[in-house]
Structures are given as C-alpha cells and as structure tokens.
Amino acid sequence: MHVHLIGIGGTGLSAIAQVLLEKGYEVSGSDRVESAVTQNLHNLGVRVYIGHQSQNIAGADLVLRSSAVTDENVEVQAAFESRIPVVKRAEFLERLIDGQECIAVAGTHGKTTTTAMLAWVFHGLGLDPSYIIGSSSLNLGNNAHTGKGKYFVIEADEYDYMFLGLIPKITIVTNIEHDHPDCFPTYSDVLEAFKSFTSRTLPSGIFITNGEDPGASQLLAFAKDLGLRCVTYGLGSGRYDIYADDLTQGDLGGYQFTVSRKKGGHLVDVTLQVPGLHNVRNALACLAVVNSLDLSLSTAATAMQEFKGTARRFELVGEISGVTIISDYAHHPTEIQATLAAARTRYAERRIWAVWQPHTFSRTTALLDQFSKSFEDADRILITEVFAAREAPPPGGYSTQSIVESIHGDALFFPELTHVRSYLGRQLAAGDVVIILSAGDANRLGSWLITDLVDKQDQKPDD
C-alpha cells in the first residue's frame, strides 16, 4: 500500500512516516520547505517532494494530511479529483497501531518527555515497544519505531482532536490547562475534549493521572464514573496511589527520591538526570504504568537513571567559556515557569537569561496574564517577535513590543533573532546560563551562540 503524507516535515507526520516505512508500506510525502527532518526521511527511503504539486500524489492509495493542510491544497484537490481517500491523523491512528495494546500519554504539558521516558523504560525492560514521540529521544535516537512487542506507546496530542483516533488500553493524563485557544476557545472546551478522549479507553483499561493537578482531578472523577481502574500519582507521602517523597537534589542534575504506594509501602528508589519537579511527576506516571503491568520496578528505575530527555526539552546545546546554552520547547506559561524553576535549582548562583519566542498570536493574547507571572526565576528576559506558526496576524496587525511591558518591566524586545544574537554576544560572561524558550525557530539561536563563543574564545591572545 502506498501512503502519501502532506506536511511530512512536521513532528506528527514524520513519525508516522517512519512507522509506516518499518511496517513495509510504500511512503512518499511533501512539505513546503526542506529541513533536517525531510532530509532524514529521504535518507531512510521515503520519497520526499519539496513544494506541493498535484503530480506528487501519483500512485498513492491513501493521502494523510497534517492539521495545517487545508482542502485548498493542490495535492488534496488532486486526491479528491482522483477519488483517493484523504484523512487526518485521528482517522488513521487505529490502523497504524494495528492490534498492539495502546498506551496513550496525553496532557497539556509533559506528554513528550513522559512518552519518551516510558518508551525508554520499556526498551530497558526488553519489551521492544512501538512508539511515536513528539520529539527525538536522546536515548533512542529517533521519535518513532515499529517494535515487535505487544505495546504501542504514543504521545496523544489534543490539538485538532488527534487523540480521539486512539483506543487506549492505558490512558495517562499528566495535567489539563487551557491551551491552543485557536482550537479550544475556553478551558471547558479543553476539558470536554479530554473527557471524550478518556471515554475511548477500553472498559478493561487503566486511567493514570496526576492527582496534584486540578484539571486532571476533574477528569479523574469522570474516569471513575466510567468504571475505569484509576491510579493517581503525585508528590507527598500517602495522598496518592503512587507517590514520591524524600526528594533531594542528586549529583546527576535531577532529583533523587523514594517511590511508594499508598497501599503496600516502598516500591523503589529513583535518581534522574533530567531536572525539575515536573520530571519527578513524569517519572511517577511511567512507574505507575510499570507497577500496573506488574513489570520490574528496579529495572525501570535503572532505565530512568539513564534517561537523558528529548530534543529541545531542557536540552544542553553546549558549554563554552563558562557559558551554558540550553534549548527548551516551553511555549505555555506553566511550561516556562517549570523550565526556569528547574534551571534555578540546577544553576542556583548563576545569572539566567531567558530568551522567549512567543508562539502563535492566539496563545500569546489569551494567556498574557499568566505569561507575566512565568519569568520569576530569570535574571534577564529577552523577548522576540511572535512565531505565527499556522496563524495569520490578527486584523489591524499585532505589536509584540507592546506586550513586553505587560510581561515584565525590565524585559527587552528584539524584532529579529539576529538582534538577540548580537546583543548576547556583547553581554554574555562566564557563569551565565541562556535558556531559549521556543516552539518555533528560535532554537537555532543556540548553535549561533555557540559559534560566536567559540570564535570569541579563539580570538583571545595566548597567555
């Protein structure tokens, strides 16, 4: 069967393309621009077209399109005319999972890291899972794989209701907050979508959620009414089914902690490399799965200690001349706050520069008040122009500079990334930490800054 993917360079479709290729499908795809992702797919054997043309779909039995691709796309139009079925991810996922037991990881924040961690843990347990992750795993070296095991671990994206194409055996919900206002105008819309997703869990399935999160707790009551077996996790002894306590800052950069269950006492001790309390919660979600399936918790803990994270999730870009550069995908107020808190814990006495590229006009506007409270752990704040992604500017235009003062009185606005590069090139000193907060293209600043720091170092006279 020949599947053609329109928007193949995106995170979701590129992962599906890899799984399809490993399953033996003929795979082709197109995207507007060439990228490292499209080049990698080409190297794997996918026929990739740069630019959209009607002839690109020749020979396809099915066309799969990303959420950003509309009916007006020339390839979609050609498929309609040729009576080739055109579907979105949600309509295709059940076929992709193909008889394996689905473990779906959903939530406003943390789903990518939790999915990657669980895939790595299952790998360590020798289960050879299939998986789709929203970012490349630094341990596994990819974001998708077709395994021979019984489980398919998948990041369940709420945007465009993608997760409603899944029928999970195990559903994990890390948290629920208002996000994607272009898709969900209100928090109630988000909650209803998550309820619809939860109701797709198999009747014999398991619902695992963060007991500390107010939104997830609302969903928990709904899951109990459905008759699902429910497991909660959180920080603090005895309040949740699976909990962490005795937390200390470990030598590897993350926390060390003890994991216990409300009924049954101590389970396992865990040490993490990945920093922040949010990653302790992500680890608890994974351990709740392992415990529910009666798998080895000690083996899981060993794998967790080895877990390095994923690309652009507190990813170390480099350290040059005493300056540390980190790239993070944080684009929601809660994510920015968690990332900067983790940085402050790890780099307590160092000067932290937060470089934030707002992502989409709708999110920036809808959550502006929350954003203003997210930067407390940063010493310096630099804000770039909004990365529009799939959106057009609102009627009458949009002034990012006008929101900077609302975010923080001492924040600086830079209309171009090159301006940020120049400014930091003059300001950075040994001991500084730069956190690039971007779900857009500002991550390239990381490699630019490393290059500039190396050049600066090379220009220093020998002692």
Image (cartoon, rainbow, N blue to C red):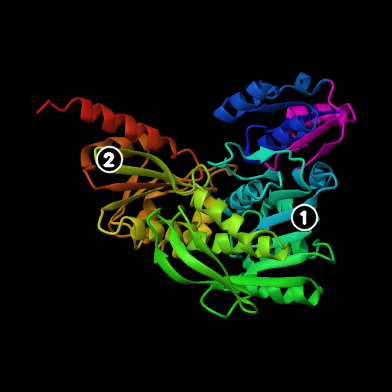
Q: Where is residue 238 drawn, in percent x and y?
A: 57, 80
The circle on residue 164 is: 1
Q: Position of residue 74 (x, y in %)?
A: 74, 27
Left or right of 14 in this view: 257: left
> What residue does disc 2 label?
424
Real-space Cα distance between discs 2 and 1?
44 Å
Q: Quadrant of the N terminus?
A: top right
Residue 213 placement: quadrant: bottom right
Q: Is mark 1 on a helix, strand or loop?
A: helix
Residue at the image point whose x is 77% and y is 40% from the top? 148
Name the residue located 37 percent from the left edge and 40 percent from the top edge: 415
Q: Give the residue displayed 32% in from the left and 44% down from the top.
A: 324
Q: In which quarter of the image is the C terminus?
A: top left
Whether residue 83 can be seen here: yes
* Residue 441, horizontal then vertical, whole percent: 48, 38
Q: What stretch is highlighted in magenta?
A: 59-88
358 and 8: which is toward the camera: 8
Q: Would you place residue 454 above or below residue 193 in this image? A: above
The residue closer to the viewer here, 231 or 454, is: 231
Quadrant in the picture for residue 428: top left
**Is 424 rendered above or below residue 301?**
above
Residue most toward the left? 463
Q: Which amino acid does label 1 sit on?
A: Leu
